[in-house]
Amino acid sequence: MSAKHLFFILMVYGLTGFCVSTTIDFPKEPFLFVRHGKTDWNPDAIHQGPTNLMINSRGKEDAEKAAERLFNLIYCDNLSTPLQHSQNYYSDQLIIATRPEGSENKNSEEKPTQSKTDPSSDFCLSQEYVIISSALKRAVQTAEIIAEKLQQPLNIMPGLHERYYGDLKLLGNDAKEGVLPPDAESEESFQTRIYNSFANILKDDRFRGKQKIIISHSCVFKKLSLLLTGTQQTIDYGGIVLFIPTESADTWTAQRL
């Protein structure tokens, strides 16, 4: 069995939805998750873990598209009339924007109708936000493109990197499907790291009162979505997802933007 194939098997084994029981005690505050752009390893389904790879030309396009989408969200998709911030969802961070009555721009092109039952359809970033990234190069490069577009500083935070699946060489000839090397980060340790990292970001006094844009990785997103929504979800390269707390103590929703 080749190292590439075993990497793929371990990736599948590690992402099947296993969740260590824990009580969710995040601040009731929405935040945005952005996945980094594509790297040369991604097309071959090789699990990268903490390997410090750089994004490729396609990954740069992914990052630029994400930056453009976030830029448009600041101005509510570049609507030419002012928007009233009319309602908050449990926090000053999530702004639901509505166009003032009678202020429609008759000369602008008609925009696609979006569902009013989906909070993300009317989501608009406020001017107070912060950009936070994993320390791995592929995330930092993506975050730098976003930060340049939004003209904001970049904050590098520990604990947001990918899960480490271990050194395959340590398994020698005994490599088996579903068996991780002894130096691999355990499922419980990975979940605890992700939970604590995001909780610390949301509680950080430096970021209080600002919307958080967090650039991280696929496995991190899958684990986070499982922890918060109860369902393991996926995210595309450069994808943007809005996590929104509900009235229930331990329930969140994840809305793709």
Image: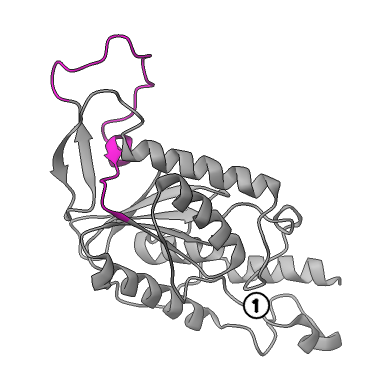
Q: Secondary structure at mark 1?
A: loop
User: Taken as a whole, is the magenta stretch helix, strand or loop?
Assistant: loop
Which sits in the foreground, 16 or 150? Answer: 150
Q: Position of residue 233 (x, y in %)?
A: 48, 55
Image quadrant occupied by the C terminus: top left
Question: On the image, which quarter does residue 27 sit in?
Answer: bottom left
Residue sticking out furthest to the top: 107
Q: Position of residue 223 (x, y in %)?
A: 47, 66
Q: Is residue 217 left or right of residue 183?
A: left
User: As displayed, is residue 135 above or below residue 89?
Assistant: below
Q: Is residue 37 left or right of residue 190?
A: right
Q: Which residue is mark 1?
A: 165
Q: How many numbered discs?
A: 1
Which amino acid type is marked by label 1?
Answer: Tyr
Q: Position of residue 249 (x, y in %)?
A: 20, 65
The stretch drawn in magenta includes residue 102: yes
The residue positioned 20% from the left and 28% from the top of the image is 82
| Residue 234 visible at all | no
User: As displayed, is residue 83 above or below residue 217?
Assistant: above
Image quadrant occupied by the N terminus: bottom right
Question: On the image, which quarter does residue 6 sit in?
Answer: bottom right
User: As displayed, is residue 182 above or below residue 228?
Assistant: below
Q: Is residue 173 left or right of residue 18?
A: right
The magenta region covers 100-129
- Crowding around mark 1 (Cα neighbors within 10 Å: few <14, some 14 to 19, many 20+) is many
The residue positioned 14% from the left and 42% from the top of the image is 87
The residue positioned 30% from the left and 57% from the top of the image is 252
Q: Is residue 204 left or right of residue 46?
A: left
Which sits in the foreground, 56 or 118? Answer: 56
The residue positioned 40% from the left and 59% from the top of the image is 153
| Residue 128 visible at all | yes
